[in-house]
Each structure stands twice: as structure tokens, then as C-alpha cells.
Image: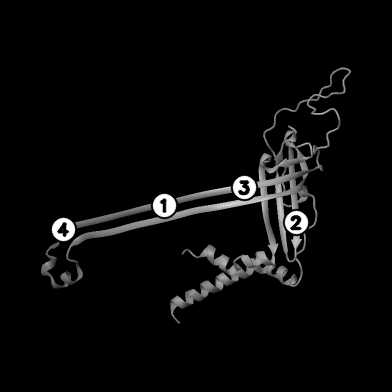
């Protein structure tokens, strides 16, 4: 067996081992769920999830609410009666996700270069008179020619639209009164789960009287729409192919 084949076998074995390790836990979970519907995740407190960090933003100095003498009106209030909109940790509000994105980009880059170096020396130290030197040395000494060219093209044509609503929970109230909200929705249809996650910072002034807010008014918005299940699993490349895509240089 040639050394080339041995190296190929070693590389294949290493890639297979890496793929097995990477997919070990996931494969066991998938085997245990054969014939069963994907399970919905439990409802948990977002602030207790691994990796959760409170949002910190530049804040102005807090203003103390003041009351006028013999008046029930408080400075900064928008209505005399109690406001039913979300304002405290644990309150709910409805986020209307209205996302439309369209992009068309085309780029092309061309590059070429030609180099030629010719010394013109054909008889270096009498090399033409020496039989062995004539066989080894070329006709011209110190001659180099090179040609390089590249042509790269790329284009992007993307159009996305998402319209839906999701209820979110206020997880934090910032010192200036802005609200940190996070909402998650899961819908299971047969053997596929579609999930929607929305998070960000909203101003209480942007919340409508019906306790709704448009997603375009969410600062630091994080919107994720996807799924998991049999259809999503079929659409994903196999673990071995993903490992090869990462490791192979060509």
C-alpha cells in the first residue's frame, strides 16, 4: 500500500472520529426520539437561562417624580387613570413582527499580471563548450516567466418577509424607564416545531394603547424564526459533510 493511500486512510479515520464525537450526544437524543413528536421546551424564567446577562446601556440620571400641591397629577404621567400598558417586570405586551427585507448585490473583480525576466546570457562561463554543462544548463541563464490571473464574481438576491405576533415578557426595567422584553413562541405541527424568538429594548412611550408595539421600534432587536423536527433535519447536511466542509482546504 502506498504512502498516499495510508495518509488518506489516516485522514478519513480522523475525520470520522471527529464527526462521531461531535454528533455523539445529538445522535443519541435523536435515536431516543424516533417515532415520537419533538418535545416542546418548558416555560422557564429567561433570567435563569445559561448565558443570560442583564442589559446595560448608558443611562441619564433618574428623575424623582413630583406632585403639585392639592393635585393628583404626577409629572411624567400620560393619563389620569391607571395605565394598563406594560411597565414593570413580569408584565406582558404584544409585539407585532412586521419584517420585510430585500437586497440585490452584484460584484465582480478581475485581476491579471504577467512577468517576464530574460537575462539574455546564453553562454555562462563557457557552458556551451562543456558537454555535460550543456545538457544540464538551459539555453538561457536566469530566465523567468510567470502569468497570473483571477476572475471573481458574486451576487446576492434576497427577499424575506415575516408577519406575525408574539407576546413578550418584561424581564428588566432600565434606570431611564426603558423596558427589556423577551418573547418566545413554539407551535408544533405534526412532527415539526416552528419557533419564534423576539427580544430587545422598547420605550414605554412607543407602546400603543392596546399594549402592542411594532418590531421596528425595538432597539437592539433580536428576532429569530426557525424550526426543528423531521423536515429541518432532512434539510441539514450530515455531520460528516459539515466536518469536511470545515477542514478541507479546497
Secondary structure beneath dot 2 equals strand
Label 4, label 3: how far apart the Cα atoms are: 66 Å
Q: Nearer the viewer, mark 3 or mark 2?
A: 3
Secondary structure under tag 4 reads strand
Question: Which residue is at 74% across, 38% downward?
Answer: 179
Mark pair 2, 1: CA separation: 42 Å
| Quadrant (top left, top right, bottom left, bottom right) of the N terminus | bottom left
* Disc on the earlier residue, 1 or 4: 1
Residue 41 location, quadrant: bottom right
Density class for disc 4 (Cα within 10 Å; few <14, some 14-19, many ≥20) is few
Q: Tell me the residue that label 4 is attached to.
A: 120
x and y percent of residue 200 in the render?
A: 70, 43
Instruction: Name, please, the residue furthest toward the right.
Output: 70
Disc 1 vs disc 4: which is toward the camera? 1
Label whose residue precedes the other's in the sequence (2 or 1): 1
Dot 1 falls on a residue whose secondary structure is strand
Please tell me the numbered disc located at residue 108: 1
Q: Nearer the viewer, residue 121 or 80?
A: 80
Mark 1: give few (<14), some (14-19) or many (20+) Cα within 10 Å: few
Instruction: Using the image, determine if residue 70 lies above or below residue 162.
Output: above
Asked whether 179 or 115 is in front, the reply is 179
- State the colouring used for the structure image: one colour
Q: Residue furthest left?
A: 129
Among numbered discs 2 and 4, the one appearing first in the sequence: 4
Q: Is residue 96 visible?
A: yes
The one nearer the camera, 70 or 120, is: 70
Amino acid at each position: 500500500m502506498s504512502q498516499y493511500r495510508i495518509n488518506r486512510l489516516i485522514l478519513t479515520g480522523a475525520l470520522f472520529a471527529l464527526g462521531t464525537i461531535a454528533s455523539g450526544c445529538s445522535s443519541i437524543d435523536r435515536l431516543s426520539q424516533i417515532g415520537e413528536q419533538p418535545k416542546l421546551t418548558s416555560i422557564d424564567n429567561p433570567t435563569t437561562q445559561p448565558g443570560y446577562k442583564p442589559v446595560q446601556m448608558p443611562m441619564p440620571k433618574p428623575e424623582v417624580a413630583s406632585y403639585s400641591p392639592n393635585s393628583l397629577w404626577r409629572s411624567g404621567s400620560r393619563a389620569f387613570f391607571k395605565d394598563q400598558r406594560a411597565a414593570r417586570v413580569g408584565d406582558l405586551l404584544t409585539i407585532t413582527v412586521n419584517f420585510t427585507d430585500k437586497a440585490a448585490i452584484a460584484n465582480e473583480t478581475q485581476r491579471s499580471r504577467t512577468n517576464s525576466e530574460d537575462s539574455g546570457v546564453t553562454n555562462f562561463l563557457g557552458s556551451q563548450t562543456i558537454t555535460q554543462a550543456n545538457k544540464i544548463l538551459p539555453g538561457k541563464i536566469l530566465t523567468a516567466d510567470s502569468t497570473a490571473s483571477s476572475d471573481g464574481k458574486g451576487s446576492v438576491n434576497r427577499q424575506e418577509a415575516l408577519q406575525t405576533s408574539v407576546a413578550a415578557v418584561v424581564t428588566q426595567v432600565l434606570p431611564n424607564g426603558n423596558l427589556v422584553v423577551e418573547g418566545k413562541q413554539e407551535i408544533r405541527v405534526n412532527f415539526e416545531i416552528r419557533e419564534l424568538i423576539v427580544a430587545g429594548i422598547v420605550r414605554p412611550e412607543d407602546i400603543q394603547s392596546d399594549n402592542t408595539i411594532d418590531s421596528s421600534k425595538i432597539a437592539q432587536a433580536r428576532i429569530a424564526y426557525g424550526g426543528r423536527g423531521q423536515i429541518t433535519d432532512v434539510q441539514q447536511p450530515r455531520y460528516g459533510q459539515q466536518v469536511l466542509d470545515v477542514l478541507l482546504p479546497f
